[in-house]
Image (cartoon, rainbow, N blue to C red):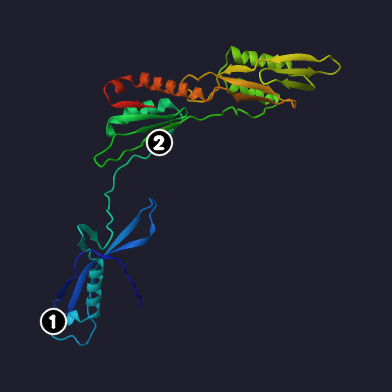
Amino acid sequence: MNKVFLIGNLTRDPELSETNSGISVCRFGLAVNRQYSSSDGERETDFFQVTAKPTSSKLKNRSNKAMENNNIVNDVERIVRENMVQVIESNGRTFATKSLVEIEPRKDVAREIRFSDLSSIVEIVKREMQRFALPIYINIESEACVSVITSLDSEKDREKPYSAVAEGNRFHFGNGYDYERFVIAIRSLFIQTEHTANLLQLLKKVSNIESVETSDDGITQQVVAKQGAMLASDVKISPIIKLAPFRTFIEVGQPESEFLFRISDGNSFALYEADGGAWKIKARQNIRSFFEHTLADEIKTGNVVILG
């Protein structure tokens, strides 16, 4: 014979009654929480309808009084007393003997979709915004991250159905590159402008050298290039170079900013950011302009608001 112990909370008060054959029984409901959580991270609850009968041979006349002397009835009544919430008033303050936890109803919430571009945000907002509490807010969190949030619902909650994070290879500023990797990075990770052309032309002057010696006074840098038995030649490098690397979403203009270009004695090339991060403000402005243009009608009707 299997023996099962159920520990839980009563879902209704116990009821004492008799069967058609005259046996006294006690009926009550019991809610038992499972020890493990579901795939959604929530604990499920099992509900049992329990019918208990006395086993004592001392019961007489199948009376309720005899039933009250039974251990099962006593245990049930003890469970009821322990789970009963009492409200106590003391010195003008109200206390409860137990902490109450609200069981919130299940809400249908959209699972967040993450994109890597801004155009997808525009397309899905136009198609699905009427399914959410309006207006929808497009929050420009940074130069590389945008999120979409809804208005407050009746329970003061918001949804975050969409977001976009700029992806792709980025230049590592402050790190040294060898000649080949540096040239490839300049051609593939930057907008090609007159300034990148000048930088590549400068690199050609030091591409076929056996060694370089540098001198740096903090303002300009002078490179002495030596090749075989040839006389050394001096190459002066401009201290500041304006470049536009890919650092934000591809749909918007890449902000141009200033960089320090340096060549080390070990034939290593590096760029250092020199604008204090001002480019990030320009990038967010470009993102805002993109949304204001592509969602002009939705913004005009008040269904979309741009933040940041």
Instruction: Give the residue furthest to the top.
Output: 194
- The answer to which of 53 and 91 lies nearer the viewer is 91
Disc nearer the start of the sequence (1/2)? 1
Which residue is found at the position 27% from the left and 31% from the top? 134
x and y, in percent, of residue 265 in the image: 75, 25
Whether label 1 touches label 2, CB < 8 Å: no
Where, by quadrant of the figure, is residue 33 drawn? bottom left
> Amino acid type of disc 2?
Ile
Badge 1 marks a residue whose secondary structure is loop
Pointer 2 local density, CA inside 10 Å: few below 14, some 14–19, many at least 20: few
Which residue is found at the position 44% from the left and 24% from the top? 284
> Amino acid type of disc 1?
Ser
x and y, in percent, of residue 232 in the image: 81, 15
Numbered mark located on residue 113 in the image: 2
What residue is pinned by disc 1? 63
Instruction: Give the residue furthest to the bottom.
Output: 58
Above or below residue 203? Residue 172 is below
- The answer to which of 272 and 5 lies nearer the viewer is 272
Quadrant that contains the N terminus:
bottom left
The answer to whether residue 123 is left or right of residue 165 is left
Instruction: Give the residue furthest to the front.
Output: 91
Cα distance between the residues tagged 1 and 2:
65 Å
x and y, in percent, of residue 187 in the image: 61, 20
The answer to whether residue 115 is left or right of residue 78 is right
Where, by quadrant of the figure, is residue 118 drawn? top left
- The answer to which of 48 and 79 lies nearer the viewer is 79
The answer to whether residue 181 is left or right of residue 51 is right
Which residue is found at the position 34% from the left and 39% from the top? 110
Above or below residue 172? Residue 76 is below
x and y, in percent, of residue 276 in the image: 54, 25
- The answer to which of 242 and 248 lies nearer the viewer is 242
Instruction: Give the residue furthest to the right.
Output: 229
